[in-house]
Amino acid sequence: MDQYVEQNIRIIGADLHYGRTTFAEAGGLIVSQSEMFNRMEIADAKSTRPSTRTWKRPAPGKREARKSGTATAPRSNAAVFRSKRCALFVDQLEELAVEYDQLFWVEDVDCIWVRLTSNVLAGLDRSAVFVLRLPLLPGEFVSAWAFWFDALALTWIGPRHTNFPDGSICAFDRRHGVWSIGDSLVALQDLYCQWAFRHLHNEVEGFWPGPQCAYFTLERILEFKPEEHCGCRRPSGTYADCCMSSDKIADVNLAAREFLPLHNWNIRKPPVSIARFALGDLEPLPKLSCLPFQKKLRYRLLTSCASGCFSEC
């Protein structure tokens, strides 16, 4: 990995760890507070913004006949778009395509599948591929998966801060009101890119930067480093300064009985159909046996409170 990239990882990681503001620019590139301030000092806000890319409305996905028993019939666009939810997402996907130009989406009966890529960090030797499932039925939340992609392989980004059992992204606790359906998809995808950056930092620097949520003792014992933010319900500083001592003397068997049956015995991984879609295989579309428990500005502020995570978000 390039030395400049490693240095940037440390700088942005420190911003996240100490609660300083980070930014996302076009394509989901995460930018440190100091870098952003340097750009603003060099020129005024207008000249520091990257030039707007030429953009054409993306084609509304690939539509082909779907099998229903022995009969085959084309899908009805009217049956999909008459849903207000679908219309909302379609409008937001146009906005998302401006910021994330390597994007395509496909309509399905109960959802819209989206695939997009981001380099996450300038100069990084890999890209991140994200698969989003935008639900068209009531009572469901957006699900997303992420993979690192280079010339050799597609590698799932996980398991840390992913949902059980399907390995989907857990970038925030839904109960904190960070994002809800109807809010900007650009803002949501920015959070996913920041979440991917945190994984990158954990890989390079050896710890998860910034706030996180982990309410179960066993989860903290298995995953947390002493210097990380504690993830309990009332955190007070680092894990070492908060819950590490009490977790060490806790009854591990009791902690396991509380955690493992509710979390698929600590096993999580994305469905094969999701990985295939991430590689660009549109047929057949992913079918999930279970679901997670469920731009206006060129630079978008990312608040540290959005980085909290819970394994059942």
Image (spheres, rainbow, N blue to C red):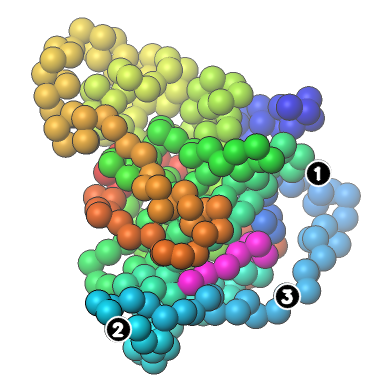
Q: Position of residue 44 (x, y in %)?
A: 84, 59
- Give the extent of the magenta segment: 99-106
Residue at (40, 86) in percent of width and height: 74
**Pointer 1 residue:** 38
Q: For the residue labelled by badge 1, is the local secondary structure a helix, a strand or a loop?
A: helix
Q: Which mark is residue 4?
A: none
- The quarter of the displayed image where residue 268 is located: top left
**Relative depth, front residue between 160 and 186:** 160
Numbered-mark total: 3
Q: Residues within 10 Å of mark 3 (few under 14, many from 20)?
A: few
Amino acid type at image mark 1: Asn
Disc 2 and disc 1: Cα gap in Å?
Answer: 62 Å
Q: Is residue 214 left or right of residue 26?
A: left
Farthest residue in the front direction? Answer: 70
In this figure, which residue is indicated by the disc labeled 2?
71
Can I make out residue 92 in this image?
no
Q: Is residue 260 above or below residue 185?
A: above
Residue occupying image coordinates x 81% and y 44%: 38
Q: Is residue 31 left or right of residue 234?
A: right
Helix, strand or loop for disc 2: strand
Label 2 amino acid?
Answer: Ala
Q: Earlier in the sequence, mark 2 or mark 1?
A: 1
Residue at the outermost bottom position: 78
* Disc 3 target residue: 55
